Amino acid sequence: MDHGEKRLMDKNQESLFVRLIPFFERYGILLLILIMIAVLHLLQPDVFLSWRNVTNIFKQVSWQSMLALGVFMVIVTAGIDLSVGSIIMLSLMGLAIASKAGMPWYVVMLVAPAIGFLCGMFNGIGITLLRMPHPFIMTLGTLYIFRGIGNLISGGVPITGFAEQIRVIGNGKIKLDVFFGEGAREYIPTSLILMIVIFFIFWVFLNHTRIGKWIYAIGGNPGAARAAGINVDRILIVVYTLCGFLAGIGGLILAGRTNSAYPNAGLQSELDAIAAVIIGGASFFGGRGTVLGVFAGVMIMGILRNGLNLMNVSVFWQQVLIGSIIILAVYIDVLRRQLATRT
Amino acid sequence: MSDNLVLEAKSVSKFFGTITALQNVDLHLNKGEVLGVVGDNGAGKSTLMKVLSGLYKPSEGSLFFDQEKVTLNSPRDSQNLGLEMVYQDLALAGNLPIGDNIFLGREPTRKVGPFNFLDHKKRKQLTEEHLSKLKINVKSADQKVEELSGGQRQAVAIARATAFNAKIVLMDEPTAALAVKEVGKVLDLILNLKKLGVSVIVISHRMDDIFTVCDRVMALFQGTNFAESELKNTSRDEVIGWIMGKKD
């Protein structure tokens, strides 16, 4: 084999490798989930893939995924929202108080998303109109403010017991008697359906509407967005408002799941949301990431926690593991980008 | 000549407090003409461009588009009159594909029920048509801008400026940040625009640029008109002299 021929073959091999990069870029994370499922199934063959456990995972991630989806949009604009954990608590408390005051269930149900909407809008207005130097500062402030208000209106004590209609969102079951026979225990959680619908809507919003495109453009280069005549401040207010709204939906789901509003609801869940977004492949510097990636990130966190619980691994080890996975996921991303620019 | 006049500035002055950036500057541009504007740093070239594009309001003097007097309140106004500015920092979003950048803020959409959705197919088709009209070669319209070379990015910025039938394009140092082998492609692109009947104003420090693409060159010195000539009646040495404020 002469030299020229060898070089040609190297080039062919490289191009095959290069062609695989976008494939891994797009689906690598789903592969990771499949591996996790396979490993956990081998370790816990009777339990992990049981109907009961799988629905449990989905019920757990459904409210967390709302936070992650909202924070994802914010991160795409190169921003951050630290207040979503407090928004979920405030909207939950608002819902509980409305419920306790005897309002009809359909009003109570609207209270949580409405509070989330207003909180998010408050963040957005603060970041743009008050010209806060960075969203970190505004939302760090509202992280304290919203939880403080939540405790003020509830007196800092839990409020329990909601109407059945409200609980349906977070705790409802769609029976599968049709498939499994009369009285079967298999069911699909309502919150799973809600999660899928909302993720689909936001996927359409981000990928197939002009505002969605502009959200990515702002994350890529806000100057370019402005030069293109896009009202960047208005779009940012929309993004933070939607993020708060989704946290409010999360509050509604949590209300159904726990049947209670409690002072520590959503505590530190903003960090879980950020972790899921980063594990899902979004860039912290904005402009990059997909809705499917967020979903995958949320699932990885959920499956990991569930699997470790099943194997009786201590919560402290779970913290160490999740932290390591965040760093590992981002490091793989760094390596991948190096490979991509090398070619 | 007068029928061909697309843009004219008459005794434009611009003051910033006590500083005089421009003093009674005249400029005119014909259809399909490439005008070079030269001058030392601080001579007022960029200020003049910003006045023409509507970013600054002139303190004195007036502007004429197609021989009609206009008042520009923002770059939007000049865009509506068919004038586009290619910014020196390019103003592209690197994370988005070429087509998305060209149509950013003006995306083609299609209606589905009450909603407007992006028309990805149409955008791709318009992008490919426009790129081939300008003879810009890229692998695909879906390539991300951050994967392009400096020259290709400059070409995308110019494509963006001309995607909506611009009649006048202003370019501030279009070759300043480019590798030598890419400069030629951008200059070819400017000549292409000229062939398509677009008028271009190029600010440049590089005599090679000026003498490759321009029909006429004008020099500003300390905020005033200093000299002007058809390109064929002047020389590099003379133009360099103008930049330094020397005239025979």
Image: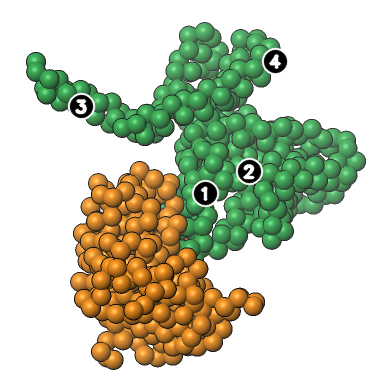
Q: Residues within 10 Å of mark 1 (few under 14, many from 20)?
A: many
Horizontal relation, residue A118 to residue A303: left or right: right
Label 4, label 2: how far apart the Cα atoms are = 27 Å
Is A81 drawn above or below residue A343 in the view shown?
Answer: below
SS class of the residue under badge 2?
A: loop
Q: Can you identify the residue that label 3 sits on?
A: A11
In the image, what residue occupies the spot 46% across and 80% down? B224
Q: Earlier in the sequence, mark 3 or mark 2?
A: 3
The disc at residue A80 is 2
Disc number lying in front (3 or 2): 3
Q: In the image, what residue occupies the spot 90% across and 41% down?
A: A155
Task: Give the residue number, with chain letter if any, for mark 1.
Answer: A219
Give the alpha-carbon distance from disc 2 to disc 1, as whole Å. 12 Å
Instruction: Evaluate if marks 4 and 2 touch, with contact meaning CB atoms under 8 Å apart.
Output: no
Outermost residue, left side: A1
Q: Amino acid at mark 2?
A: Ile
Mark 4–mark 3 Cα distance, whole angstroms, equals 48 Å
Q: Earlier in the sequence, mark 2 or mark 1?
A: 2
User: Tag 4, which secondary structure?
Assistant: helix
Q: Amino acid at mark 3?
A: Lys
Labelled disc at residue A316: 4
Q: Quadrant of residue B196?
A: bottom left
Nearer to us in this view, A268 or A258: A268
| Mark in front: 4 vs 3 | 3
Q: Amino acid at mark 1?
A: Gly
Q: Give x and y (percent) for residue A300.
A: 53, 25
Q: Which chain is rendered green in the image?
A: A
Of all chains, the one bearing label 1 is A
Depth check, mark 4 against mark 2: the one in front is: 2
Label 3 residue SS: helix
